[in-house]
Image (cartoon, rainbow, N blue to C red):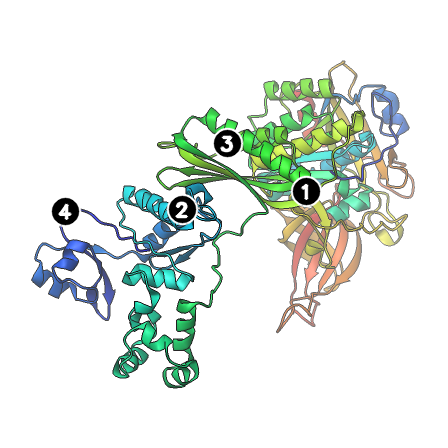
Amino acid sequence: MNNVRLSGPESQSSHLTFGAAMADARLGVALRHAALHEVFAACPADSAAAAGFTVLLAVRASRGKPLLWVRDDRTVRETGRLDPAGLVELGVDPDAITLVHARDTRGVLQAAADSVKCAGVGTVIVEPWGQAPEFGLTESRRIAFAAARSGVLALVLRTGAQPVPSAAETRWGVAAAPSLVLGANAPGYPAFVISLLRHRGGLAGFDARVEWNRDRKAFHDAPLSRGAPAVPARRAGDARERRAA
Amino acid sequence: MRANAAPRDAPFALIEKAGGAMRVAATDPSAHALGIVPGLTLADARARIPDLAAIDHDPEADRALLDWLADGCDRYSPTVATNPPWGIVIDIAGCIHAFGGGADGDEDGAAELAADLCRRFERQGLSPTTAFGDTPDAAGALATFGGDDVLALPVTALGVDGEIHRALRRAGLRTLADLARRPRAPLAARFGSATTEALDRLLGRVVPVTPRRHPPEIEVETRFAEPVARTDAVLATLDELMRRAAAILSEHGRGGRRFEAALFRSDGHVARLGIDTGQPTRDAGILARLFRERLDTLADPLDPGFGYDLIRLAVPVTEPLAPQQLQLDGGAVAEAELAALIDRLTIRLGRGRVRRFRAGDSHVPEQAAFDLPITDTAPPVAWPAPEPGEPPLRPLHLFDPPQRIEAIAEVPDGPPFRFRWRRVLHEVRRAEGPERIAAEWWKHRGGAGLTRDYYRVEDQAGRRFWVFRHGLYGVERGAPDWYLHGLFA
């Protein structure tokens, strides 16, 4: 296997943090390692924002272990392939990632169930395309149980899907946020609007605007200065998702 | 060796269209006895035998049958070649020990092997002719023309074209012995070098057989006196073979990357199962699990028919693997678990579906880096470090091929002002560029393609895109097309 590992700032703790003070304070220890968490793209065009947020969470959670990314053929067709050059630019080491391309949702679920059981894996990103009706409560429960037993962090990444009941510990909605402009009107660092849509322990939902810092390998609360526009109003889709949850 | 399909009842002929007429391509023995010879038109043949059954000649099917038969002949020797349209050459040197051949019993062993082969072919309704020769060509000629002395063969056996053949007959040269007695140089001058070369191939210069399969580095097999048909018996045999292969690998300090099991059915059919591993391995336990996994994923389950009488395990690809040490720490266990997981996924999903990233040596974005099957061994290449302080300059999601968009630019050679992608309009609020990426003109002859001007743009909702204008405005293109190539996080 690869000798190079993702290296995140977290090492021993049982939960992971964003590094952004506001969001971390609201979350406490809600983002546990040995559990299943869901990330929904606010709309299909936010697929890269959701994928970026997910892989960056995985980097922070890595504890020196490799990452398995399970996608299906439809996902690759609709959102494009993962560009290792782009991963490097986010501060992710492509050598620590093993890609698994399944044919369909069933293949994704089977590969995910196998991978989550394996204690040698740090994080499994499960990315079926669309609503994927095969991915119901039973399947997510199976993954959540396996993760709890093996200590693997399971992240389910959904694009073009509405939330359905699941065994996930937390559910996040992610959309791209306008970045803080750099010189000459150039787009800036990756910025996200993240919304906690649901928490099993009953934590209240909240929105946060975070920016990724590649050098510190951490998110931080995105400042609103430097002439940036205010936080955009919550999109219509987000409210719908919260109701569905 | 010749194999003709031989139905017992009515005379029949295979016909093909040649020279504007339906002509006989081949016949069965009974039609042949009645004077139907290849080359005859179907009308003439029907005049002789009114109820002659005519079937379309299908060379493809013949070829497939020959390949199928040659597969079955793998049981005799690793060096099997086909000699179309109806020949199979088997190099049996050193391969007859299983048939009672030894240092002194060579002849008996070879005859026993030939008898075994004939029995199997006859069970398929074929009538094979076998012959032994010192060279592949000699064996082929003896099988075709009969006899056991190469020198007694007619000059036809040389397989030279009609002109030279007639010249040989006119010179009174009838058998190969007549030719072999004469000095080579005048023969070559008179009848062409093709003649003397064919003679050499028949009489002694051994041309190596080009085998259909590359002989593997390691091969172990078990033969059964009684065919086995039960799956658990087959699996138990495979386990035993894997233990033997593992012992050989361990002796050589190597591990296998690919394992192939060949199950030889007694009727000549061969089922082949292959597994690939992500790392060199020689752990019989892991291999046994992988083979079971492989059997479970077969689209058609194994059909043992009347049973397998030979099971063989080959290790075609091996790599150095240091002797195993007792590793008791958790890290090594996790590592091994991970390797096993990756092998299992590779087998369940198919070769090439478990992949890792590799850097390429091109500056064209879609070729600069890609993902490779994890079973491919490629040296790792260092990834370029990102520029400190810069935002990501390459997207996370890359479309290959790039997706066409409708874009409007404020100035023809500036960034887009708004664009439509997948029926949604995006207003560009921020843009940076162009980053000019030229086509690889040194790789394509006659026009390399167009230069691309890349822009990083952000829309009104904050989504970041990587778009490019295909062609320099006014230089390469009047109105260049726009493409969306990737999405930034």
Q: How far apart are marks 4 and 1 (CA)?
A: 58 Å
- What's the CA distance linking mark 2 and mark 3? 36 Å
Same-subunit check for callouts 1 and 3 = yes
Dot 4 corresponds to which residue?
B9
Q: How far apart are marks 3 and 4 (CA)?
A: 42 Å
Q: Dot 4: what SS?
A: loop
Q: Where is residue A165 in the image (x, y as percent from the top left)?
A: 63, 19
Amino acid at circle 4: Asp
Looking at marks 2 and 3 on the same chain, the residue that comes earlier in the sequence is marked by: 2
Q: Mark 1 points at which residue?
A: B252
Q: Do the residues at discs 4 and 1 belong to one chain?
A: yes
Q: Where is residue B394 in the image (x, y as percent from the top left)?
A: 77, 50
Q: Is mark 1 on a helix, strand or loop?
A: helix
Lower sequence index among marks 1 and 3? 1
Q: Name the residue under label 3.
A: B295
Residue indicated by mark 2? B109
Q: What element carries label 3?
A: helix
As displayed, is residue A27 above or below residue B148?
Answer: above
Q: In this view, does A165 lie to the left or right of A211?
A: left
Q: Answer with mark 2 or mark 4, whichever residue precedes in sequence.
A: 4
Q: Do the residues labelled 3 and 4 touch (CB within 8 Å)?
A: no
Q: Distance between the residues labelled 2 and 4?
A: 36 Å
How far apart are the alpha carbons under marks 1 and 3? Answer: 29 Å
